C-alpha cells in the first residue's frame, strides 16, 4: 500500500507528550493541516473491503487448527459486563469465570482481561489479584462520550486509581464528524497522559462513523495520538464490529507500524457472538497483518456471550459430542 | 394439454420455521414401492441435526410456557390443515407404502384423528398425571407434570404418516419441542406435514423435520448434551441398542424401540405422553 505522506517532506520535530511519532510529528500543527493529512489518506474501496472480508470468512478451519483457534480466541477475550445493573457480586462471578472459563477442564486457558465500568474496577482488581488477568475499565463518559474534558479525565483517573490496567476510552464522535480532528486528537493525548501506566484503548464507535474512509481516518488519528489499541465499538450501537471494519483497522495498524515502527493493537467489540465469527477474525488477522498480531497483547475480542460459544465448541472437540447451554455458566 | 411437463419436486428440510436445504447440500431420490421416481428429498447431515436442536431449544420456552388450552388449540388447528391436505397425504401414503387409495385414505384419517385426540389431551394431563399428595404436617404437597425439554424423535420407518403422527403429536401435546428424523425411504408425508405445520399456528422451531438416515443423525442426537429425551421408534434393533448406550452418557429419557414396528392404529393410551413429562412436586405451607 502507498503511504500518505512523503516522510522527507515533513519537518523533523522531536517527540514528546502530544506529539505524533516520526515521520508524522508535524501533521497536528493545526486543525487544517491535520484535516489535510487525514483526508489525504488513501480512500477505502468499500466494495473491495467487503468482498475481501467475505472471501476470508469462507476459509474452512478444522480439527487441530480449530482447536488452536478456539484456545487462542479464548485467551484474547476481554470478558465484558457493561450494564447499569452491574453489581460487585456480578463482577466477582465474572472474574471467577475469567480465571477458569471451563471449570470442568483445567487445560482451558484464561481470558485476557475483564472489562467493567470504572467504579467496579477495584472489585475486579481484587478478584483477579495474582492471576495475570488484566482489569480493563471503560471511561470518558462511556458510551456516549458527551461530557466536558475535565469530567472525562477525572473519570479516567478514578478508574486508574481503582486499579484498572487498561482504559477503554470513547472518542468524541460529534467533534470527529464535524471535522474538529485536532480536538479529538488533543483529548486522546490528554487521556493518555491521565492513564499513566495503564494501557489506552481508543473506541472509535465505527457504527457512528458511517463510512470506511472515516474508520481509516479515526484509526490513524487514534494511533497518532498515542492509543495502544484501537477498538471498534462500545457495543451499545449497532452495527458494532463487522469484518470489513476490522479489515480496515488492521490495515491501518499494519501501515502505521511500517511507517513509525510502533505496533498498535486492535479490538473488535460488540456483535461477535459465535466461534465462527471469532475464527473469521483470526483468519483476517493472519491474512492482513500476519502472526505478529495473533496474540492477546495485540488483539482482543470485546465480548460476553462469545466466550460461552467458544466453550461449547471446545467441549464438542474434547468430548466428541455436541454440548448445550446447560453446560456453561449463565452470565 | 397431455404433453405437459411433469413438475419434479426437490424438497427441503423444515427447520426453525423455515425450509432450508441440507447444510451438506446433499439430496436423495425417493421412490415408490415399485421403484418409480417420486421426488428428491434433502439428505440431512449431523450439522442439520445440531441446528435443529438449537432451533428446538430456542422455541422451548414459548411452547412449554403456553397454556395447555392454547397448545390444544394450536394442535387442533394442525389437524384442520391436515384435513385440507388429506388428498395429498393419501397420494403420498399410497405411493410410499404401496397401499390402495382406500387403505391409504383410512391411514390418513386415522392420523388426523390421532392428532385431534392428542390435541385434546393437553389440558387434561395435569389432572390425570398430577396429584395432591397426602402429607403429615401443615403443608400442601402436590405434583404436576412438566415437559421434559427438547425431544429427538426417530420416526417409524414403515408407517410414514400414522406412525409419524403417533410419535410426534404426544411429544408436542406434552409441551416439548421436537427434532424429528423421518422415515428414510418414505419421507414425503413428513415433508408435507412440515408444510402443514408451517401454515398452522405452531411457532417456528417447535417441530423440526429432517429427512435422511436415522443411522447417520441418530447417534449425534443421542449423544447431544442439549437433547433431553429420545424416542427410538424408528431405529432398527442394533442401532437402537447403541443409541440407548450413548444416550446414557447425558442421562436422557429414552423411549425404547419395540422389537417390531407396532400396529399404529391401536389405542396408544398415555404410553407416549408419560415418558416425555417430568413430575415436579411442591411443598407449600398452609397459611394461617
Image (cartoon, rainbow, N blue to C red):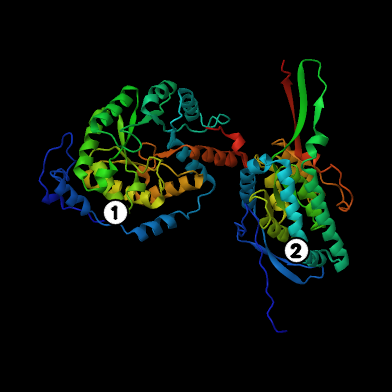
Q: Nearer the viewer, residue A14 or A187?
A: A187
Q: Nearer the viewer, residue B144 or A32?
A: B144
- B61 to the left or right of B267: left
Q: Which residue is found at the position 74% from the left and 18% from the top?
A: B286
Q: Is residue A188 above or below residue A125?
A: below
Q: Is residue B73 above or below residue B84?
A: above
Residue B100, given in percent of the width and then of the height, sits at 87, 68
Asked where in the image residue A221 lies, by quadrant, the reply is top left
Q: Nearer the viewer, residue A279 or A151?
A: A151
Q: Which mark is residue B85?
A: 2
Give the position of the N terminus of chain A as an image quadrant.
Answer: bottom left
Please indicate, yes or no, whether residue B23 appears anywhere in the rendered image: yes
Residue located beneath label 1 in the image: A213
Residue B56, given in percent of the width and then of the height, sits at 65, 46
Mark 1 element type: helix
Nearer mark to the viewer, of 2 and 1: 2
Amino acid at each position: 500500500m502507498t503511504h500518505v505522506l512523503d516522510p522527507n517532506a515533513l519537518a523533523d520535530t522531536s517527540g514528546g507528550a502530544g506529539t505524533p511519532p516520526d515521520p508524522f510529528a508535524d501533521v497536528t500543527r493545526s486543525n487544517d493541516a491535520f484535516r489535510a493529512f487525514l483526508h489525504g489518506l488513501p480512500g477505502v474501496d468499500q466494495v473491495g473491503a467487503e468482498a475481501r472480508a467475505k472471501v476470508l470468512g469462507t476459509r474452512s478451519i478444522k480439527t487441530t487448527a480449530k482447536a488452536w483457534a478456539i484456545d487462542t480466541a479464548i485467551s484474547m477475550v476481554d470478558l465484558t459486563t457493561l450494564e447499569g445493573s452491574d453489581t460487585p457480586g456480578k463482577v466477582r462471578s465474572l472474574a471467577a469465570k475469567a480465571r477458569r472459563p471451563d471449570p470442568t477442564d483445567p487445560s482451558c486457558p484464561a481470558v485476557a482481561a475483564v472489562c467493567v465500568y470504572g467504579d467496579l474496577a477495584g472489585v475486579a482488581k481484587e478478584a483477579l489479584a495474582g492471576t495475570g488477568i488484566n482489569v480493563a475499565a471503560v471511561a470518558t463518559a462511556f458510551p456516549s462520550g458527551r461530557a466536558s474534558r475535565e469530567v472525562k479525565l477525572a473519570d479516567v483517573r478514578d478508574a486508574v486509581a481503582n486499579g484498572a490496567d487498561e482504559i477503554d476510552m470513547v472518542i468524541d464522535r460529534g467533534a470527529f464528524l464535524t471535522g474538529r480532528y485536532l480536538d479529538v486528537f488533543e483529548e486522546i493525548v490528554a487521556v493518555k497522559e491521565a492513564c499513566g501506566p495503564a494501557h489506552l484503548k481508543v473506541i472509535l464507535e465505527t457504527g457512528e462513523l458511517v463510512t470506511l474512509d472515516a474508520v481509516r481516518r479515526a484509526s490513524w488519528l487514534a494511533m497518532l495520538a498515542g492509543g495502544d489499541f484501537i477498538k471498534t465499538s462500545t457495543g451499545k450501537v449497532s452495527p458494532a464490529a463487522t469484518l470489513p471494519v476490522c479489515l480496515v483497522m488492521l490495515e491501518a495498524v499494519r501501515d502505521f507500524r511500517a511507517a513509525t515502527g510502533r505496533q498498535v493493537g486492535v479490538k473488535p467489540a460488540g456483535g461477535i457472538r459465535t466461534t465462527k465469527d471469532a475464527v473469521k477474525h483470526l483468519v483476517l488477522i493472519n491474512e492482513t497483518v500476519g502472526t505478529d498480531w495473533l496474540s492477546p497483547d495485540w488483539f482482543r475480542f470485546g465480548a460476553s456471550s462469545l466466550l460461552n460459544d467458544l466453550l461449547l465448541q471446545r467441549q464438542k472437540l474434547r468430548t466428541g459430542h455436541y454440548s448445550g447451554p446447560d453446560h456453561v455458566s449463565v452470565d | 394439454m397431455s404433453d405437459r411437463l411433469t413438475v419434479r419436486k426437490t424438497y427441503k428440510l423444515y427447520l426453525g420455521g423455515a425450509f432450508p436445504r441440507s447444510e451438506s447440500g446433499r439430496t436423495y431420490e425417493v421412490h415408490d414401492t415399485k421403484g418409480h421416481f417420486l421426488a428428491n428429498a434433502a439428505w440431512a447431515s449431523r450439522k442439520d441435526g445440531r441446528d435443529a436442536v438449537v432451533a428446538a431449544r430456542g422455541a422451548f420456552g414459548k411452547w412449554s410456557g403456553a397454556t395447555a388450552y392454547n397448545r390444544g388449540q394450536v394442535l387442533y388447528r394442525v389437524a384442520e390443515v391436515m384435513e385440507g391436505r388429506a388428498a395429498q397425504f393419501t397420494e403420498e401414503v399410497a405411493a410410499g407404502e404401496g397401499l390402495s387409495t382406500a387403505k391409504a385414505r383410512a391411514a390418513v384419517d386415522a392420523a388426523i384423528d390421532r392428532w385431534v385426540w392428542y390435541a385434546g389431551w393437553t389440558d387434561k394431563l395435569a389432572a390425570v398425571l398430577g396429584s395432591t399428595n397426602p402429607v403429615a404436617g401443615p403443608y400442601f404437597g402436590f405434583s404436576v407434570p412438566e415437559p421434559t425439554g427438547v425431544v429427538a424423535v426417530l420416526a417409524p420407518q414403515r408407517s410414514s404418516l400414522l406412525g409419524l403422527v403417533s410419535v410426534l403429536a404426544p411429544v408436542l401435546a406434552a409441551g416439548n419441542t421436537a427434532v424429528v428424523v423421518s422415515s428414510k425411504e418414505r419421507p414425503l408425508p413428513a415433508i408435507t406435514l412440515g408444510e402443514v405445520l408451517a401454515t398452522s399456528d405452531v411457532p417456528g422451531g417447535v417441530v423440526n423435520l429432517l429427512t435422511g438416515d436415522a443411522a447417520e443423525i441418530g447417534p449425534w442426537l443421542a449423544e447431544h448434551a442439549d437433547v433431553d429425551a429420545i424416542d427410538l421408534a424408528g431405529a432398527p434393533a442394533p442401532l437402537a441398542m447403541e443409541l440407548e448406550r450413548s444416550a446414557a452418557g447425558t442421562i436422557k429419557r429414552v423411549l425404547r424401540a419395540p422389537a417390531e414396528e407396532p400396529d399404529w392404529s391401536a389405542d396408544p393410551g398415555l404410553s407416549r405422553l408419560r415418558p416425555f413429562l417430568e413430575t415436579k412436586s411442591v411443598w407449600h405451607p398452609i397459611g394461617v
